[in-house]
C-alpha cells in the first residue's frame, strides 16, 4: 500500500498546452512588410524596364527583338500539319515534297521578318504642337545602315488614345526616313510620348517582329481657339499723314512701307508711282507697317466665362494678332511683355497651354 500511494503521488505531470502556430502571424507580418520577398504562389506584376535611348538613338539589336507567329501564321502551321498527316496516311510523295517546300518557305519568312528590323536606329524628331481636339504627330527618325531594304515598318504607342494609323515606312539600302506616331490630343497641357512599339509583318504576314523604345519627348497642347471670338482689342493706329512718319500702302506685291527719300537711297528702292502721285520723292523700305503693342489680358474678359473658355478666347486673340501687332499676355501669376515673331507667339501659346502650372515665383 505505501508503494501504491507513492506511485500515485509521483504520477507524471500533464503536458502543457502546445504553443500556438506562429505561421498566421508570420504570414501577416510578411504581408505587412513591403520589403520582404513575396510568398511562393503569389504572383506580382513585374516592373517594365524602360528602353531608353543611348545618345538619343535606340538600336533594335538582337537582344531586344521579339518574334511570334500571327493568326495567319498559326493557320499556316495547322495547314502544314494537316498536309503532313495526310501524306503520311496515304504515302503521297508529292504531298511530302509540297509540305516540306512550304515549311522551308515559312522558315525563310521567319528569318526575313526578323532581319527586316534588325539593327535599325531610331531617334526622336521634331514635334508640332497641336491644338486641343486635334492630332499630335511625333516624328521618329529611322536610319538603315545596311544595304538591304526595310519594308513595312510601323510604329504605334502602347497606351493612350490613338488616332488613325500612320502609313508604314519603307527604306532603301543605307536610307533614312521619318516614321509618324499620331496621338489624339483631347485636352490642353503637356502631352508626353508613351512607349513606342516598332513592328513589322513583312513579308507575308506570317510572323510579327517588334521592339520597344521609350523616348523622353513631350509637347504642349494649345487651347482650342474660340471660333466666335470678337476682334482683337487694339490701340489706335499711329498717324500716317505726318511728314516724318512712315506711310503704309498696299501695292501689288503686298504691303510696303514708304518714307521720304534720303540722299543715297538706291534707285530701285524709289517708289516712282507714289512719288508721281504725291508730288514728293518716296522710297520703299519693303517692311510691313507695325502697329503699337497691346495687352491680351485675362481680367478684360467677362466674369461669367469659365477657365477653359477664357483660355480659348485668349488663344484666338494671340493667333489673330499674328506679326502685325506687338502683343503682351497677362494671366494670373504670368506676364509676358509685348513682342512679336514666331518665338514670342509660341511662348504665349505655351503659357496658355500649361496654365496654371506656369506661374510667377
Image (cartoon, helix red, strand yellow):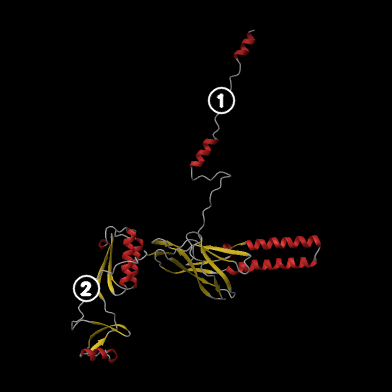
Position above or below: 306 against 293 = above
Relative image position of residue 45 (x, y in whole percent): 53, 51
Asked if residue 173 lies left or right of residue 138, the reply is right
Tell me if residue 126 comes above or below residue 10 in the rendering.
below
Residue 264: quarter of image = bottom left
Residue lying farthest to the right in this orientation: 91
Mark 1 is surrounded, within 10 Å at the Cα level, by few (under 14), some (14 to 19) or many (20 or more) other residues, namely few
103 sits left or right of 290 in the view: right
Q: Quadrant of the N terminus?
A: top right
- Judge from the rendering whether residue 124 lies leftward or rightward of residue 41; answer left or right: left
- Quadrant that contains the C terminus: bottom left
Nearer to us in this view, 51 or 167: 167
Specify which label sits upstream in the sequence, 2 or 1: 1
Per the rendering, the mark at residue 184 is: none
The image shows residue 91 at horizontal and vertical percentages of 81, 63
Mark 2–mark 1 distance (CA, rounded to whole Å): 99 Å
Circle count: 2
> Residue 300 placed where, x, y %?
25, 63
| Residue that numbered label 2 is attached to | 236
Q: Secondary structure at mark 1?
A: loop
With 196 as the anchor, is 67 left or right in this view?
right
| 333, above or below 172, in the image | above
Identified at 70% across, 62% down, the residue is: 79
Local packing at callout 2 (Cα closer than 10 Å; few below 14, some 14-19, many 20+) is few
> Which label belongs to residue 17?
1
Amino acid at each position: 500500500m505505501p508503494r501504491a500511494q507513492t506511485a500515485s503521488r509521483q504520477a507524471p505531470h500533464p503536458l502543457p498546452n502546445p504553443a500556438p502556430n506562429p505561421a498566421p502571424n508570420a504570414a501577416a507580418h510578411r504581408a505587412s512588410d513591403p520589403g520582404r520577398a513575396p510568398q511562393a504562389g503569389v504572383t506580382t506584376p513585374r516592373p517594365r524596364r524602360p528602353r531608353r535611348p543611348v545618345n538619343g538613338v535606340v538600336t533594335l539589336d538582337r537582344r531586344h527583338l521579339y518574334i511570334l507567329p500571327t493568326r495567319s501564321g498559326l493557320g499556316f502551321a495547322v495547314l502544314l500539319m494537316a498536309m503532313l498527316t495526310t501524306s503520311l496516311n496515304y504515302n503521297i510523295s508529292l504531298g511530302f515534297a509540297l509540305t516540306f517546300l512550304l515549311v522551308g518557305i515559312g522558315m525563310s519568312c521567319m528569318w526575313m521578318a526578323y532581319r527586316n528590323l534588325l539593327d535599325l536606329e531610331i531617334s526622336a524628331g521634331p514635334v508640332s504642337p497641336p491644338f486641343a481636339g486635334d492630332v499630335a504627330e511625333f516624328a521618329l527618325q529611322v536610319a538603315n545602315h545596311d544595304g538591304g531594304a526595310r519594308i513595312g515598318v510601323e510604329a504605334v504607342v502602347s497606351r493612350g488614345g490613338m488616332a488613325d494609323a500612320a502609313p508604314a515606312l519603307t527604306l532603301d539600302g543605307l536610307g533614312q526616313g521619318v516614321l509618324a506616331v499620331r496621338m489624339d490630343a483631347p485636352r490642353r497641357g503637356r502631352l508626353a510620348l508613351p512607349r513606342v512599339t516598332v513592328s513589322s509583318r513583312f513579308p507575308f504576314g506570317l510572323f510579327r517582329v517588334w521592339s520597344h523604345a521609350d523616348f523622353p519627348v513631350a509637347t504642349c497642347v494649345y487651347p482650342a481657339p474660340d471660333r466666335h471670338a470678337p476682334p482683337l482689342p487694339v490701340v489706335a493706329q499711329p498717324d500716317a499723314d505726318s511728314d516724318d512718319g512712315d506711310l503704309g500702302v498696299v501695292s501689288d506685291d503686298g504691303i510696303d512701307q514708304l518714307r521720304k527719300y534720303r540722299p543715297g537711297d538706291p534707285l530701285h528702292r524709289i517708289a516712282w508711282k507714289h512719288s508721281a502721285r504725291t508730288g514728293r520723292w518716296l522710297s520703299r523700305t519693303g517692311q510691313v507697317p507695325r502697329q503699337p503693342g497691346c495687352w491680351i489680358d485675362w481680367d478684360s474678359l467677362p466674369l461669367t466665362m469659365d477657365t477653359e473658355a477664357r483660355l480659348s478666347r485668349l488663344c484666338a486673340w494671340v493667333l489673330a494678332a499674328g506679326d502685325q501687332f506687338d502683343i503682351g499676355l497677362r494671366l494670373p501669376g504670368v506676364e509676358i511683355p509685348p513682342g512679336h515673331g514666331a518665338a514670342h507667339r509660341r511662348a504665349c501659346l505655351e503659357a496658355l497651354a500649361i496654365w496654371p502650372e506656369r506661374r510667377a515665383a
